[in-house]
């Protein structure tokens, strides 16, 4: 995941139909409102991730880790100010390195990157 680029979520999980996928890395938030967003992603390097709305990083959502031994996990609330906002998880602008999504972490089975979006 290059600096400034979005993490891809290649598989769809369960949905109530309120949200839709824009592409492999972003999701449509159809209504103006507040959302709870949680995500977890295994990466091979120390690094940071943050949420972005319509391609713009949200400074208050940056999470990270200093070593390469755990997932990067975030849980926060965001508020949209326009309908049909595109939500993504990005490697924040200003970071120095790209991140490698770890396909198999800690064992023989593939791990997943997940994001949960709840409208409040």
Image (cartoon, rainbow, N blue to C red):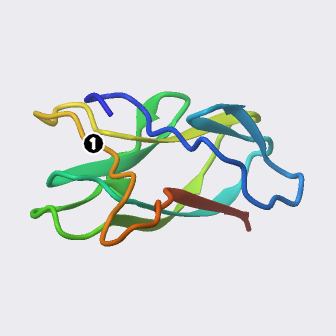
Q: Is residue 27 left or right of residue 43?
A: right
Picture coordinates of residue 38 (x, y %)? 53, 65
Q: Residue at x 10, y 64 (%)?
A: 67
Q: Residue at x 16, y 51 (%)?
A: 45
42 above or below 19? Answer: below
Callout 1 secondary element: loop
Q: Considering depth in this image, is 42 or 75 the residue closer to the camera?
A: 42
Instruction: Work out which residue is located at the far front of the displayed protein and give it.
Output: 108
Q: Residue at x 86, y 52 (%)?
A: 18
Q: Quadrant of residue 68?
A: bottom left
Q: Is residue 24 left or right of residue 48?
A: right
Instruction: Work out which residue is located at the far right of the displayed protein and give it.
Output: 17
Picture coordinates of residue 43 (x, y %)? 28, 53
Determine which residue is flagged by label 1: 100
Picture coordinates of residue 50 (x, y %)? 37, 48
73 above or below 100? Answer: below
Image quadrant containing the C terminus: bottom right
Image quadrant containing the N terminus: top left
Q: Residue at x 48, y 66 (%)?
A: 76
């Amino acid at each position: 995941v290059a600096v400034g680029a979005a993490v891809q979520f290649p598989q769809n999980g369960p949905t109530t139909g309120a949200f839709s996928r824009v592409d492999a890395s972003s999701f449509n938030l159809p209504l103006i409102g507040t959302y709870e967003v949680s995500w977890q992603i295994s990466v091979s390097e120390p690094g940071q991730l943050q949420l972005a709305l319509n391609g713009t990083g949200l400074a208050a959502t940056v999470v990270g880790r200093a070593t390469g031994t755990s997932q990067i996990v975030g849980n926060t609330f965001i508020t949209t100010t326009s309908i049909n906002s595109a939500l993504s998880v990005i490697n924040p602008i200003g970071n120095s390195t790209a991140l490698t999504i770890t396909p198999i972490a800690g064992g023989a089975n593939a791990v997943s990157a997940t994001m949960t979006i709840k409208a409040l």
